[in-house]
Amino acid sequence: MHIRPPLHTAPQRNTMLASLLCVAVAACSAEPASSSSALVADAGGAGADGLAADGDADAIAANDTTSDTAPPDAGPQQPEIVWAPCTGTYQGVTAECATLILPLDWSNPDTEGLPINVARIKAKKPRRGALWLLQGGPGGDGSGLAPIAAEFAKKVPDLDLYLPDHRGTGLSARLGCETQEAATSIGGAAIVSFEWQGCLKTAVELWGDNLAHFTPSNAARDLHAWIDATRQEGDKVFIYGVSYGTYWAHRYLQIFPKEPDGVVLDSVCPPGVCVGDQYDVVFNQVGKAYLDLCGQDELCASKLGKTPWKLLGDLYSKLEDKKHCPNFTQKVAPLQLRSLFAVLLRQVQMRAVIPALIYRLDRCSPADEIVLSKIINLMQYLGGGLMPNPGVDGLPKFATAKTFSELLNAHILMSEMWSVPAPSYAKVQADFLATYIAPGATQNTLLLFDKWPTFKRDEYANTFAATDVPVLLLNGTLDPQTPDFYAKAMFDGLKAPNKRLVLMPGAAHGTVNQAPMFTGGMCGMELSGQFFSDPTKAVDTACVGLLVPVAFTLPSYIVQQFLGITDLFENDGKTDSLTAPHAPWPDAPWSPTPGLPRWQ
C-alpha cells in the first residue's frame, strides 16, 4: 500500500507580497578556471566598503508589481507555531522542529494545503535575527545541513538557525516510491534504472496533477511564508544556499528581492546554465583539471608522468579487452570506473586516491590487486557507481533514513533544469562514453523523459534576479558538481549592485567544509561568518591565501584505515608518497552526502 502524506484544506496564511522582475540571461564561458589563482570580483561601482555608491533603481522591481503567478495577498495570520524536539535524522545536533500547512498551489491558496517542515537551532546569545540554510539536490532535506549548522552556530551565535525541508523532501510531503526504495529491493534505498518506471507510476497514482506544484518557485514561496511567520520586529534575516540550494535561494530573491538582509550562494547553480544533461560533461572537465595538476606535481608526475589524462585514456583501452588486470575488471567494468573516480573527485580529501588508483591499475601487480580489492570495498561503501554493500567489513554503515527524494530530483531536473531543446538519450549517452571521470547521473531517468509529467516553466526560469540585497558568491575551482564558470555566470547575470564573487583555488563542492586552510577551519565558513556578521562590509579574503594546496596523498593513518597499506602508490613498505603535503582530515568532516551518483 502506498500512502500519500495528508493534504489539508483552506490553510491559514500570512500576507504575501511579491516583487517580480525578469532579466536576460548573460552569456558565459564553459571553460573551468585555472586552479592556480583566486578570483575576487565585486559589482561595478562599488566603494571602499564593497557596496555600490548608487543603486540601479530602474533594475529593482517595485513592491506593487504583480503577475498571475504571484502569491496572493491576504488571509488571517498564521497560528502560533508549535516547536518540539526533532526526531530521527539531525545527526546528533540538538534542534526543534515545527510544521506549517502552506498552499500546495500558491496560485490558488484556498484549496489543499501541504505540510512544510522546518528545524530550528536557537541563538546562543541575545538574538539579532535568523539564518536560513538551504540544502542542495534537488531532493535534499534540511537535516543534511545539520553538521554545518552546528559550525554556523559558533560563527554567528546571535542568529537563530533554520533548516527547512524543501517541499517534496524529508518531512515536507517527501516524494518517494515505497516498493522501489524498500531495503529489500534490488537497489535498496536507491532507485536503480529498471525501477524508475514503476516508481513514476506510483507517484502519478498518488499525486496526479498535483505533482506540477512541486517546483522551485513554490518552494521559494514556502520559504517566504516561513520567514514571515518567524520574523520578529527588527530582525535581520540571512540566507545561505549550497549547490541546488543556491538555485532555490536565487529563486526566492527573484520573487522577493527586498526581503532578506544578505544572501550567500555557495557552490553556485545559475539558471539556464546549471542543467542536468551537462552534469557528466562538466564533471569530466574538472576531473581533467585535477589530473593536469597531478602532471605538474613532483610526486604525482613521478608516478603518472606529465600527462596523466592521456595515461588514463590509455588505461581504459587496456581494460576494455578484459585481458589487463582481469581480477579487477570482472568486478568493476570501465564504465563503473568512471563513476568510481567521480565519487572520489567530489571530496577534497578522497580525490587523492584517484592518481594512486590509476597507477596501480596500470601496473596491476599481485600486490596491487590486493589493494584494488580493498578499493572496491571502499567504493561499495561510498557508492561509487557500484551496488551498495552495507556489510563491508571494517566500515561503518550509512544511515538509511528516507529523507532525500530521488523522485523530486528527477522531477525538477527534467522540468526546469534541462537544456531546451532536450538532447536525445543517444547524445547524453555519447557524452558519458566520451568521459574519463563522470557519474553517469542522468541516464537512469532520461529514458523516461518523454513520459515524465513535467511542470510548465514559469517566468523566473532561465532569468536572473534584480536586487539591492548584498550577495556573496563562493565557489571552488575544483568543484566538479558546480564548476567555477557556473559562479561566474551567476555573478554576470545577477543584477545586484552589492554582489561579490570569491573563487577558492583547489576547493571542492561546498566551500564551508571543502576549502581547508593551513591554520585549520574552512575558508568558505570564515567568509560566510564575516558576511552574516555584517553584510554591509567587504569580507576579508585573507583565508584564500591560507588554503591548503591541491595534494595527491593522504595521511598514513587514513590510508591504513581504508586500504590497509602505508603508501598510496607503492608496495615496498616505504612511505615516500606520504611525505608530501596533504589536505587536513577534519575530525568531523562534512561534505555533500556520499552515495550513489546523484545531483547534489
Image: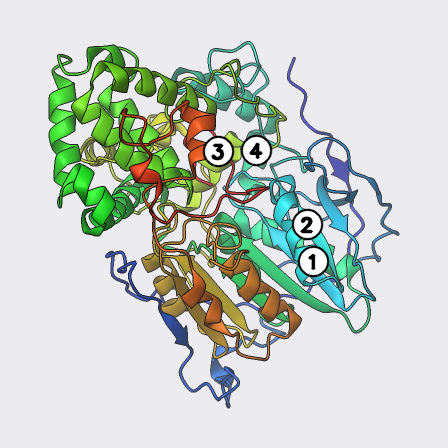
**First of labels 4, 1 by sequence position:** 1
Q: Which one is closest to the eye, mark 4 or mark 1? A: 1
Residue located beneath label 2 in the image: 150
Query: How many numbered marks have been drawn onto this rendered protein structure?
Result: 4
**First of labels 2, 3 by sequence position:** 2
**First of labels 1, 3 by sequence position:** 1
Labels 1 & 2 near each other (Cβ < 8 A): yes
Query: Residue shown at 31%/46% (left/top)?
Result: 419
Q: Which one is closest to the eye, mark 1 or mark 3? A: 1
Spatial CA distance of label 4 from label 2 is 20 Å
For numbered disc 4, what is the local secondary structure? loop
The three-letter amino acid code for the residue at tag 1 is Lys
Spatial CA distance of label 1 from label 3 is 25 Å
Vertical arrangement, residue 481 with respect to residue 73, above or below: above
Spatial CA distance of label 4 from label 1 is 27 Å
Q: Nearer the viewer, residue 210 or 514?
A: 514
- Residue 159 percent location from the top left of the image: 74, 62
The answer to whether residue 224 of the structure is visible from this angle is: no
**First of labels 4, 2 by sequence position:** 2
Q: Nearer the viewer, residue 272 or 376?
A: 376
Spatial CA distance of label 2 from label 3 is 20 Å
**First of labels 3, 4 by sequence position:** 4
Residue located beneath label 3 in the image: 594
Spatial CA distance of label 1 from label 2 is 7 Å
Q: Which mark is residue 404?
A: 4
Q: Which one is closest to the eye, mark 3 or mark 4? A: 3
Labels 2 & 3 near each other (Cβ < 8 A): no
